[in-house]
Amino acid sequence: MRRRSIHRSASDPTGDAVTPEPDISIRIFSEPQLLSGIRALVDAVGVGMGFFEKSRCLMSLAIDEALSNVIRHGYEGRKDGMIWIHIWRIPDPRGLRFVIEDLARAVDPAKIKGRHLDDVRPGGLGVHIITETMSDVAWEVRKDGGMRLTMSKRLSDEERQAVEQATQGNTNS
Amino acid sequence: MNRDLVIERLSEGTATVLRPMGDIDMARAPAMRSAVAAAVRDRPPTLILDLSQVSYVDSSGIATLVEALQVSIRNKVRLVLVGINPRVQSAFEITRLVGLFTISETVTKAAAP
């Protein structure tokens, strides 16, 4: 496996005002059994940012679907592929940004589409879940090989108000 | 983190009840699929999937449930889902599949003909 810089590759297609270095970077193998740990991490980071449970659940689901797609379609079920997950806290409007990179088989981003939900059949739901849950979703082919998926999730107005109230409460006490 | 999906198989009257315990995700959906296939092969009038011990379902899990519904219809088995918690409900809602399934509050109600 060649050496690579994970930070340099994290470009900013969404234009978020975030620091160039991710707050969290993790590398995992393309092993489905590892995904539950990533879900727990995303949920925990979401708690810290002020996301409500339903938002955290959907955000964890979206990240899980993105990783599952890399394992299933990119690495075609191989368990020895590398996947990098980078997470940034976005200060304003408050939220999280995720970048998922791999060295798997690249696909044309224009061909990545969720299926129509009226077509009731198993499978093909992952992309729909990602695009429905997250904002600024962008797939790109990495110059060094593999794919990069960038996506963000901002607090809802209700969540933002709850964070502001909690912050004010802490300041007043 | 690496626990397998444990699936209890019970009876409630003439109905068969499958009660998976754990997440139904990419790693564990195949076990669920096998259990459903085995249960449907016995052609119970009603197959109840009790999801009360399931804290998370991803698209693989949802696909498994859609498959379960399709195989049940083909085999003239009535499929009923029970015990869906809010987290699992969110996954159903975002895939807009809630209306596809018969959902009941309790196993006893689901087993009633």
Image: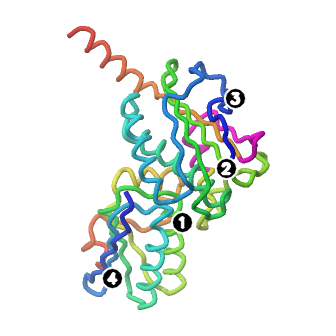
Q: In this view of the protein, which residue sits in the foreground, B79 or A137?
A: A137
Pointer 1: what residue? B63
Pointer 3: what residue? A13
Image quadrant containing the C terminus of chain B: bottom left
- Outermost residue to the left: A173
Are dots 4 and 2 on a single chain? no
What sort of colour scheme is used for the picture? Answer: rainbow
Q: Which of the two labelled residues, at mark 1 and mark 4, occupies the earlier sequence position?
A: 4
Image coordinates of residue B1 in percent, x first then y, are 37, 57
Q: Which mark is residue B16?
A: 4
User: What amino acid is at disc 1?
Assistant: Ala
Residue under the point 35% across and 75% down: B48
Report the span colored magenta.
A128-146
Image coordinates of residue B82 in percent, x first then y, are 33, 66
Are dots 1 and 2 on a single chain? no
Q: Would you identify the image quadrant in which residue A172 lies?
A: top left
Q: Secondary structure at mark 2?
A: loop
Q: Secondary structure at mark 1?
A: helix
